[in-house]
Image (tube, rainbow, N blue to C red):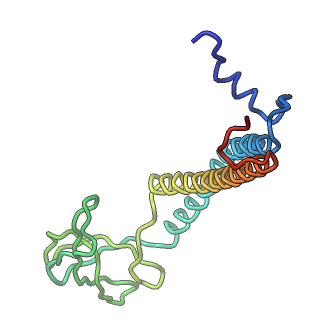
Amino acid sequence: MIGEQPLVARMWRLGPWSGNRLMRGSCRLESSVFLVVVALVLILVPLAAAFGTATHTRLDDRSRADRENLHQIAAVLLEDATVNLADTTPATGATGQAPARWAVDGTTRTGQVLTTPEAKAGQTISIWIDPAGKIVDPPKTGTENAFEAVGAALALWTTGATVCLTMLIGIRWAGTRYRMSQWDREWRNLGKAPGWPVS
């Protein structure tokens, strides 16, 4: 449409630097807060990336230490596996558990181990143990650490962006309430009820 200003130009004229004398102080404050929020959200991107990198490094160090301190040994199942219904999910499927026997430094140990639902008694499986001979989770892989680090970075950025957006919405709501009360006062000063024409 002829005479219509581009969006960028309209947004520029609504900035806090606008020389328009009709622009209220509350509107300038809202514009300033909007710019600050946009800047904070953008600054959060490299901060979240740095946090994700630090998280990945920490997880990799832990996995490396686990691979040095933990050991993978063979265990023999004493009974057929039973399905662990608590671990049945669409993503991972059913897992089984069964009592098993393994030896550490000549000492025989027994305990419940996780295995496939089809595992049978007498079958040999691999388990991870700590220096004391207790069953532990296997060290996390690099892929698992990467996914966890990315999730941590996204969680940090999402939380920060949500806080900034909530602050912006709150200030805009307060600004609208303030302008409405100002208009009410101006109408009362004119001796008219709000909503009535001046003439």
Q: Decide if residue 31 is on the left or right side of residue 64.
A: right
Q: Residue furthest front?
A: 199
User: Residue 53, relative to residue 95: is it above or below?
Assistant: above
Residue at image point 70% right, 55% down: 174
Expressed as whole percent of the image width and height from the top left, the position of residue 189 reads 82, 49
Residue at image point 24% right, 70% down: 95
Q: Residue furthest top?
A: 2
Of residue 196 and residue 176, the one placed in the foreground of this image is: 196
Of residue 166 and residue 104, the one placed in the foreground of this image is: 166
Residue at image point 47% right, 73% down: 70
Expressed as whole percent of the image width and height from the top left, the position of residue 156 reads 60, 56
Q: How many marks?
A: 0
Q: Quadrant of residue 137?
A: bottom left
Expressed as whole percent of the image width and height from the top left, the position of residue 181 reads 73, 53
Q: Decide if residue 17 is on the left or right side of residue 62.
A: right
User: Residue 129, relative to residue 109: is it above or below?
Assistant: above
Q: Quadrant of the N terminus?
A: top right
Residue 53 visible? The answer is: no
Residue at image point 28% right, 71% down: 87
User: Residue 7, relative to residue 193: is it above or below?
Assistant: above
Of residue 14 and residue 59, the one placed in the foreground of this image is: 14
